[in-house]
Amino acid sequence: MKASPRFDRRLWYGVPLALLAALLLCEPSRLDFALADLFYVQGQGFIGRHNDFLEDVLHDRAKQLVIAVGVLALAGFLLSLLPGRLRPLRRTLGYLTLAMGLSTGIVTPLKQATGMHCPWSLEQYGGVERFSPLLGPRAAPVEKAGNCWPGGHAAAGFALFALFFALRDHHPRGARGALVAAIGLGTLFSLVRMAQGAHFLSHNLWTAALCWLICLGLYDGLLYRPAPAEGMSSHGLDMAG
């Protein structure tokens, strides 16, 4: 069985973990508000809040497209359980289904656990709620608890990191295209929701890092096949590979 291309775990795990540590240690609200101000017009609200193209096409239809990819992966995995042409792809399709499912599935529980408000709900932007940072004491809601951290729409784009890892071992060119698509769509979806006042930048950075770590961790455990020399190396060297 062909070995997987090597990757540097220190880099691939370290960069997103360093980003998350920076977001925790250096409270990002000043940058968040500075960027949100660019999308907000006093007396009118967020410039994308009632934009039909952003809401119908880049929010609803785009998310449905990504959901379709996940449904196809699940259908392929179920078919791979039967004798047929898809059987050799069972592990890859199972990985893809699990990675995309977890990347998007963690969003709702985290939103419910954190209760952070969207920018459009805050008093700075015409709402009634008071801002509280992620690790700070939660301000008592005037109307209801928030439901805006991390970014759910961004997760629909960044969940496509799973396609990059699913293709990495056997289709490197397609994998590179999938990586560009995941970064591009995740970034686009993030900007759309920021323009609508639904999320701050930091919400979407958390989403990107979490989706990458989920997809990478599952790839490392389910699909990655080290070369024989690498597999025979010490545990410490293997972790640094």
Image (cartoon, grey):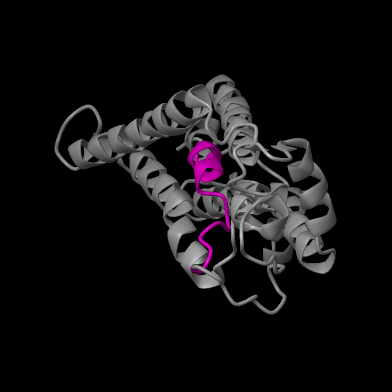
Specify the farthest residue to the front: 43
Residue for point 74% across, 44% down: 36
Magenta region includes residue 230: no
Q: How many marks?
A: 0
Residue 17 placement, left or right of 225: right
Specify the farthest residue to the left: 83
* Spot occupied by residue 38 in the image (x, y as percentages of width and height): 78, 37
In depth, the one of 170 and 202 nearer the eye is 202
In depth, the one of 95 and 154 nearer the eye is 154
Residue 21 visible in rendering: yes
Residue for point 34% across, 45% down: 94
* Spot occupied by residue 236 in the image (x, y as percentages of width and height): 73, 65
Q: Is residue 154 above or below residue 15?
A: above
Residue for point 73% across, 55% down: 124
Q: Is residue 180 above or below residue 161?
A: above
- Magenta range: 144-161
* Spot occupied by residue 235 in the image (x, y as percentages of width and height): 67, 65
Magenta region includes residue 152: yes
Q: Quadrant of the N terminus?
A: top left
In depth, the one of 74 and 222 nearer the eye is 74
In depth, the one of 15 and 84 nearer the eye is 15
Residue 9 visible in rendering: no
* Spot occupied by residue 115 in the image (x, y as percentages of width and height): 54, 68
Residue 155 placement, left or right of 81: right
Residue for point 57% across, 25% down: 172
Residue 166 placement, left or right of 237: left
Asked where in the image residue 82 lies, by quadrant, the reply is top left
